[in-house]
Amino acid sequence: MVNDERVVLGLLCAPNLEADPDATVESVMEAGPSTFRPNVPTEEMAGYFRDHHLDSAPITTPDGRLVGLLRALALL
């Protein structure tokens, strides 16, 4: 989830969405997720994904504006 200035506020995970279909996005999002800069080496990202059992991570500018989403499949 991003605000009007595209600053990342949180992440939505499928299990959280499926738990309560009447819940609001704000109540089920993971606030303050880890984000990464575009200049992080892909090898470092692959290691982070493995170590933390992740399949994607938000890529942001230093001020938190969303640039994109890096998926682990892109690193295979």
Image (cartoon, rainbow, N blue to C red):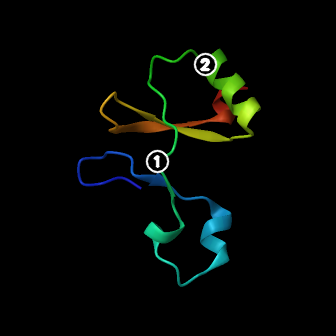
For residue 42, which numbered disc appears in the image? 2
Q: Split into 4 quadrants, where in the image is the N terminus?
A: bottom left
Per the image, the residue denoted by label 1 is: 32
> As rendered, which of 26 and 43 lies closer to the eye?
26
Q: Identify the secondary structure beneath mark 1.
A: loop
Q: Which residue is painted at 61% across and 59% down in the image?
A: 13
Left or right: residue 52 versus residue 58 is: right
Type of amino acid at the residue the image marks with label 2: Thr
**Residue projecting furthest to the left:** 5
Type of amino acid at the residue the image marks with label 1: Gly
Number of dots carrying numbers: 2
Assess disc 2: are there few (<14), some (14-19) or many (≥20) residues with their C-alpha within 10 Å of its C-alpha: some
**Residue projecting furthest to the bottom:** 22
Residue 32 place in picture, x, y as percent = 46, 47
Q: Earlier in the sequence, mark 2 or mark 1?
A: 1
Residue 27 place in picture, x, y as percent = 49, 70
> As rendered, which of 28 and 61 lies closer to the eye?
28
Q: Quadrant of residue 4?
A: bottom left
Q: Which residue is painted at 34% across and 37% down in the image?
A: 64
Q: Which residue is painted at 34% across and 29% down in the image?
A: 61
